[in-house]
Image (spheres, grey):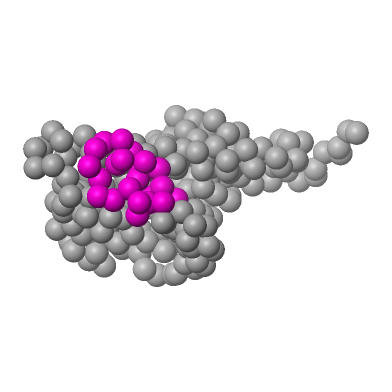
Amino acid sequence: MDTGVTLAAAFAVGLLGSVHCAGMCGGIAGALGLGLPGRRGGRLAHLLAYNAGRIGSYAAAGALAGWLGAGLDRAWLAEAQWVGRYLAAAFLVALGLYLGGWWQGLAWLERGGAHLWRHLEPWGRRLLPVTRPSRALALGLVWGWLPCGMVYSALVWAATAAAPLRGAALMAAFGLGTLPMLLLLGGSAGALAAVLRRPGLRQAAGLAILLLAAYTLWGGGHGGHAAPPATPAAHVH
C-alpha cells in the first residue's frame, strides 16, 4: 500500500463525502453551535474539541478494523494483494452510489450499527449542554460512533490496510477530510445544511467518489494494475 496516496485518497473521500454530514451530523453540529459561547474564539475551541473527539473515535475504529484485517491469512494476502484493492474500490463504488442517492444498500449497515448506538446515545445526552471544551471532546468521542454508511465504508477500506496503525491513520485522514464541513455546519448553526442537502451537490460528490474508485481499482499510486496470479503458490507448512 502506498501510504501517502492512500491517506490523500482517504482525506479526499472524507472531504467529498462530507456533504452527507449535513443530514447525519449537521443537526448535532448546529445544536452544538447554538449552545456555545458568543465569543468566536470560545466557539471555535468547543467545535475543535468536539471534532477532535469525533475523529479520535474514527481512528480507534480504524485501528480495530486494521487489526481484524491483519487477522486474515497473511500468506494468502501475499499471493493476492489485488484483493484488498478490489475490496476498497467496491466499497468506494457503494459509497459513491449511496452518496449520490442512486443506491441505498449501505442503509442496512446503518441499521446494524443502530443496535450499538442505542447503548451509546444516552451517554452523549448526559453531556448536554456543552459548557466547556472537555465536554465537547467527550461528546465528540461518543458521537463518532453514530451509525453512518459513509463511515462504515471507510472502515472496510481501513480493514484492507491489514494493520492497526495503518487503519487508524486512514480513518484519521478520512475524519480530517470531513472537518472543514463540520466546522462550517457548527459555525453556521445549521444554516448551511439546507444548501448541502440539494440533490445536485450530493450527486456531484458521489460521481467524484466513483471516479476515485476507478482510479483505485486500476492501480493508481500502486505502479499499475496488478492482475490476479494465474496459479497460486502452494502453502508451506
Q: Position of residue 97 (x, y in %)?
A: 42, 63
Quarter location, residue 204: bottom left
- Nearer the observer, 27 or 170: 27
- Image point (13%, 42%), residue name: 37
- Nearer the observer, 165 or 217: 165
The dominant secondary structure in magenta is: helix
Q: What is the quadrant of the C terminus in the image? A: top right
Q: Residue 135: within the magenta?
A: yes
Q: Position of residue 45 (x, y in %)?
A: 21, 34
Q: Residue 99: within the magenta?
A: no
Q: What is the quadrant of the N terminus in the image? A: top right
Residue 197 versus residue 213 in the image, above or below: below
- Image point (80%, 43%), residue name: 232
Left or right, 129 with respect to 149, comes to left
Q: Residue furthest left?
A: 39
- Nearer the observer, 165 or 99: 165
Q: Let me know if residue 226 appears in the view.
A: no
Q: Let me know if residue 148 appears in the view.
A: yes
Q: Residue furthest right?
A: 237
Q: Position of residue 132 (x, y in %)?
A: 24, 38
The number of numbered discs placed on residues in the rendered structure image is 0
- Bounds of the magenta segment: 123-146
Left or right, 61 with respect to 30, comes to right
Residue 38 versus residue 147 in the image, above or below: above
Left or right, 149 with respect to 202, comes to right
- Image point (60%, 34%), residue name: 163
- Nearer the observer, 97 or 230: 97
- Image point (42%, 37%), residue name: 56
